[in-house]
Image (tube, helix red, strand yellow):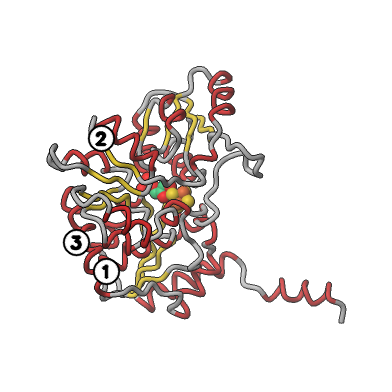
Amino acid sequence: MSPVRNIAEADRMAPSPFEIVEGIRRLKQEKNAVILAHYYQTPEIQELADFVGDSLALAQAADSTDANVILFAGVHFMAETAKILNPQRTVLLPDLDAGCSLADSAPPEKFQAFIAAHPDHLVVSYINCSAEVKAMSDIICTSSNAVRVVNSIPLDRPIIFAPDKHLGAYVQRVTGRELLLWDGECEVHVEISIDKLKLLMGKYPDAKLIAHPECTPEILAEANHVGSTSSLLAFVQGDSARTFIVATEAGILHKMRAAVPDKILIPAPAHANNTCACSECPYMKLNTIEKIHAALLHGSPEIVMDEPVRERAEIALRRMMQLG
Ligand code: 13P
Ligand code: SF4
């Protein structure tokens, strides 16, 4: 039998996307599972999820669920956050390689040495970090509440802000507080090209630029609005402009296009000539409907964590959740 015929037969036998999604729906019921997805997931994953949101909303959704199983369609630190809040529930991540360059920029041993060198500082960590780093922190923040979290700290307390130096610099500008910044960044947001962006702004002079605070300071300085993924989505809905240039990962465009079908949404261009001329997070995009199906079927890959680490990380995380 020829290999071509074998491939054709295998294709005929492989379940269709429709069958996979049906299978996921069945498994969700059988296992009492909930699917939480970030805005950077593919449209098909966002469509099948029970809840889609930014990091803060996803943490809140994980905290309030009564499902036995949480399947996290996002990256590792997000699924870890769900586990920190739900030690008694099973938390699944469809692909354990779905990491985050920003979280990886703060290895726990180096971070430990950094905070030990500044014992008088309070440690504010962006949620995009490992459970170990959360456990070393005093309070966690996300892009939607970083300003509020820093403003909640007494003025006489020096602050370490980690791991994103661009979000940190932005919070520093907005709050007027001096922050000791860890030198980390997101490989996806720093890939957005200010030169190409300026060309685009010249071509669309009426467009408003909206940007995620993980972008570089040059981009944030040009932006009409800076905010988390949820905040960017709310801005295009509430603002009267017809055209927006969107400086964040392209996955957000799915919900934006559905929310404002009559508006023009242009993804900010990346430096490299990648296929979609936009910014895509390679870690977020590791999740697929096939892997979600397999994870629900086998109850794996599962997030497991050292209990003492989880307990300490939960204290820092709950301080943030109380602030909202
Ligand atoms: P949001 O919390 O704004 O959704 O950001 C998550 C993230 O990883 C941005 O790169
Ligand atoms: Fe991490 Fe950047 Fe991907 Fe967000 S977009 S998950 S910060 S690598």
Residue for point 34% across, 35% down: 169
Which residue does the numbered mark 1 point to in the structure image?
310
Q: Depth-wise, is mark 2 or mark 3 nearer the camera?
A: 2
Q: Residues within 10 Å of mark 3 (few under 14, many from 20)?
A: some
Find numbered disc 1 in the image and state the secondary structure of the residue it sits on: helix
Lateral position of residue 114 relative to residue 46, left or right: left
Whole-number angstrom distance, CA of label 2 to CA of label 3: 25 Å
- Res. 116 image quadrant: bottom left
Asked whether 183 or 266 is in front, the reply is 183
Whichever of callouts 2 and 3 sits on the residue coming sooner in the sequence is: 2
Whether residues under marks 2 and 1 lie with C-beta atoms below 8 angstroms apart, the answer is no
Say what amino acid the circle numbered 3 marks: Ile
Q: Residues within 10 Å of mark 1 (few under 14, many from 20)?
A: many
Q: Position of residue 221 (x, y in %)?
A: 41, 25
Tell me the CA gap for discs 1 and 3. Answer: 9 Å
- Judged by depth in the image, the label closer to the viewer, 2 or 1, is 2
State the residue position of label 3: 315
How many C-alpha atoms fall within 10 Å of the one at disc 2: few (<14), some, or many (≥20)?
some
**Vertical arrangement, residue 177 with respect to residue 25, above or below:** above
> Residue beneath label 2, please?
178
State which quadrant residue 20 falls in: bottom right
Instruction: Give coordinates of residue 182: x percent, y percent.
Output: 36, 46
Q: In this rendering, is residue 45 above or below 153? A: below
Tell which circle, 1 or 3, labels the residue nearer the N-terminal end.
1
Q: Which percent across, then down, holds residue 54?
A: 36, 49
**Tag of residue 198:** none
Q: In which quadrant will I find the N terminus?
A: bottom right
* Separation of marks 2 and 1 at Cα, in angstroms: 30 Å
Q: Position of residue 140 (x, y in %)?
A: 26, 52
